[in-house]
Image (cartoon, rainbow, N blue to C red):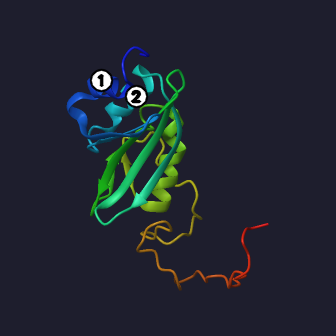
Amino acid sequence: MANRPMIDIVKEKLGDMIKDIAQPRTRRIYVSVDRNDVQEAARIIFYDLKCRLCTTSAIDTKDGVEIIYHLYQDKERMMINLKTLAPRPDLITKSVGAVFKAAEWIEREMADLFGVTFEGHPDPRPLLLADDWPEGLYPLRCDYPQKKVEGFEPQDVEEPNKDATHLL
């Protein structure tokens, strides 16, 4: 792989699945694919390009929940960020956890915290929230009520010290 730029290899391997691709820094590639292609794109990046999953993140946007799988290629020292959107109103995408085990738990976390449904996930049970957590309430979404939720009381939090420059 060292003879060709990694972005060219990613373009060749993913082909028409790519909606957008950028390399803002020498060792980082962002590639966006449709939610229906994310499983196959992840399979190619993980198995063919020999990347490993470092983590996954999600961002609640006005269009849906953007999911980013952060995969690292050790030999080339390259981070490939595979992005997809679970669009509103359904918030459904394909499960990468169905392709490789490393993504199973993080997808379960995102299902609990953002309300995303991962089609084909091998174990879609809730992971983080209490068994009696109110249905349809997702703590990391922008529409999460910040004041009072029936059955749950917010804790009083002291105002931060204005003179504090760091946390101890």
**Could you tell me residue 23's position as x and y percent?**
37, 38
**Could you tell me residue 11's position as x and y percent?**
28, 28
The amino acid type, in three-letter code, at marker 2 is Ile
The amino acid type, in three-letter code, at marker 1 is Lys
Q: Is residue 125 visible from the viewing direction of this image? A: no
- Return the residue at label 1: 13
Viewer-proximal residue among 140 and 51 = 51
> For the residue carrying disc 1, how many other residues have a C-alpha within 10 Å: few (<14), some (14-19), or many (20+)?
some
Residue drawn 50% across and 50% down?
Answer: 108
Quadrant in the rendering for residue 12: top left
Of callouts 1 and 2, the N-terminal one: 1
Quadrant in the rendering for residue 17: top left
Q: Which quadrant, please, contains the N terminus? A: top left
Residue drawn 36% across and 58% down?
Answer: 65
In this view, 2 is above or below 163:
above
In this view, 99 is above or below 123:
above
Number of the label disc, if any, that sits on residue 93: none
Viewer-proximal residue among 140 and 128 = 140
Question: Relative to 122, is 18 on the left or the right?
Answer: left
Q: Which quadrant, please, contains the C terminus? A: bottom right
In this view, 145 is above or below 108:
below
Q: Is residue 151 visible from the viewing direction of this image? A: yes
Question: Relative to 120, is 130 on the left or the right?
Answer: right
**Could you tell me residue 15's position as x and y percent?**
23, 28
Viewer-proximal residue among 85 and 3 = 3
Q: Are marks 1 and 2 in contact (CB under 8 Å)?
A: yes
> For the residue carrying disc 2, how many other residues have a C-alpha within 10 Å: few (<14), some (14-19), or many (20+)?
many
SS class, disc 1: helix
Number of the label disc, if any, that sits on residue 45: 2
